[in-house]
Image: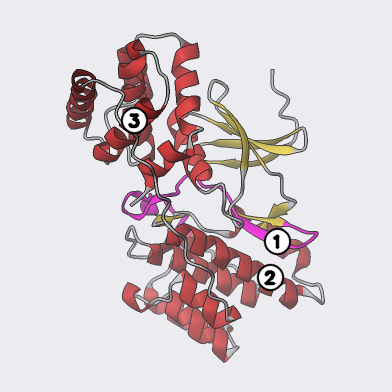
């Protein structure tokens, strides 16, 4: 039995505990693990996003870098220190860099709050953590964003993350918590009352503006606050591999994707078809497993792009295979960056 004597945190879909100097996230279900691990794999080259180290699909666990605390705890521990303002500047900078990394890729965090921002004390650094809601903007679960940090009128756009960041920035600058979800007018009154610095007042007012088109983007905010313009993320050039599959095999895979995605309303099935076809064309896979690889791809799509009728149990039932092949195939596919990138590219 796993030793979970030191629990680091709990969330909607599981808990995080300490193991061998790393943070291990234990999930309640496979679909939530798939969504978070896929996002972390895709973002593995990002400097300001927490990194995964290992995954165990059978145990429903992701092993990640261990940080000293989250931002919520850090504020409590440091708000009275003389260097608080200087440290806050570093943290604000790092959060914005993480948002730029996400938004450049067409993704949203979906649950930005101090509890989901991880802090390393020496040297001071902040990264975005708890990436269970991270997805392409269109499919981000903004309706589930923690209430205090949720836009009163939420939409699935990066502007939602910027509203959440505006609340975080307000709390960092004023040392005051927002304990309830307010209307736009109430936010205006609160900002006017407690944000005394005119420069920050203007920034926060923009981030919490009712008109989402008037809100500063993550890049614009980073430039205004720190005069930085990071290089734009370049979309990877994914090679389309020469077909090794016969016309019959290709059509069979297309038929499985078409039928299952239609029956279960699976989003982005065309991307799933491209991803699995490229994978099977590049790697030596037993032809008898083609259907299993295709069904698992559809389950992965269902997990990361919105709840559909094609759940884990349905996939297992249709695959008619043993656990070793089932979980091994998930691990094999999601360990492949080209495959993951194809699923998540806009």
Residue at label 1? 125
Foreground pick, 177 / 26: 26
Range of the magenta residues?
120-147
Quarter occupied by residue 269? top left
Q: From this view, report whether residue 148 is shown above or below residue 61.
A: below
Q: Residue at x 55, y 60 (%)?
A: 98
Q: From this view, report whether residue 44 is shown above or below residue 256.
A: below
Q: Residues within 10 Å of mark 3 (few under 14, many from 20)?
A: many
Residue at label 2? 90
Q: Residue at x 81, y 72 (%)?
A: 81
Q: Residues within 10 Å of mark 1 (few under 14, many from 20)?
A: some
Residue at label 3? 276
Quarter occupied by residue 318? top left
Please say if the residues under marks 2 and 1 sit with CB atoms less than 8 Å apart: yes
In the rendered image, residue 171, in percent from the top left (x then y), is placed at 60, 71
Q: Does the magenta segment cover residue 141?
A: yes
In the rendered image, residue 127, in percent from the top left (x then y), is placed at 62, 56
As measured in the structure, the alpha-carbon distance from the residue carrying label 2 to the one carrying label 1 is 7 Å
Q: Residue at x 45, y 68 (%)?
A: 162
On residue 218, the disc is none
Foreground pick, 241 / 223: 241
Foreground pick, 156 / 196: 156
Q: Is residue 205 visible?
A: yes
In the rendered image, residue 185, in percent from the top left (x then y), is placed at 38, 79
Q: Does the magenta segment cover residue 122?
A: yes
- In this rendering, position of residue 112 left or right of residue 248: right
Q: Is residue 71 visible?
A: no
């Amino acid at each position: 039995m796993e030793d979970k004597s030191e629990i680091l945190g709990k969330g909607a879909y599981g808990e995080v505990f300490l193991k061998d100097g790393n943070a291990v996230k234990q999930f309640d279900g496979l679909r939530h693990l798939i969504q978070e691990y896929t996002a972390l794999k895709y973002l593995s080259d990002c400097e300001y996003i927490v990194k995964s180290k290992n995954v165990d699909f059978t145990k429903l666990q992701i092993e990640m870098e261990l940080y000293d605390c989250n931002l919520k705890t850090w504020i409590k521990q440091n708000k009275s220190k003389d260097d608080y303002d200087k440290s806050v500047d570093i943290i604000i900078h790092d959060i914005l860099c993480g948002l730029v990394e996400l938004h450049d890729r067409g993704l949203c965090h979906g649950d930005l709050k101090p509890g989901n921002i991880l802090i390393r004390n020496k040297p001071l650094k902040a990264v975005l953590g708890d990436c269970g809601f991270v997805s392409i903007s269109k499919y981000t679960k903004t309706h589930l964003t923690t209430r205090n940090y949720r836009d009163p009128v939420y939409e699935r756009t990066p502007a939602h993350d910027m509203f959440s960041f505006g609340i975080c920035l307000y709390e960092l600058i004023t040392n005051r918590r927002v304990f309830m979800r307010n209307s736009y007018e109430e936010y205006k009154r609160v900002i006017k009352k407690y944000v005394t610095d005119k420069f920050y007042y203007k920034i926060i007012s923009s981030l919490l503006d009712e008109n989402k088109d008037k809100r500063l983007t993550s890049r614009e905010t980073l430039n205004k606050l720190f005069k930085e313009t990071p290089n734009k993320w370049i979309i990877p050039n994914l090679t389309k591999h020469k077909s090794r599959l016969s016309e019959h095999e290709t059509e069979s895979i297309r038929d499985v994707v078409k039928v299952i995605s239609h029956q279960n309303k699976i989003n982005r099935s065309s991307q799933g078809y491209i991803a699995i076809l490229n994978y099977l064309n590049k790697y030596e896979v037993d032809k008898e497993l083609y259907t299993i690889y295709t069904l698992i791809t559809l389950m992965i799509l269902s997990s990361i792009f919105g709840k559909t009728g094609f759940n884990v149990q349905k996939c297992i039932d249709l695959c008619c295979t043993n656990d070793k092949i089932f979980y091994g195939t998930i691990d094999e596919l999601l360990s492949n960056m080209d495959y993951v990138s194809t699923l998540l590219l806009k």
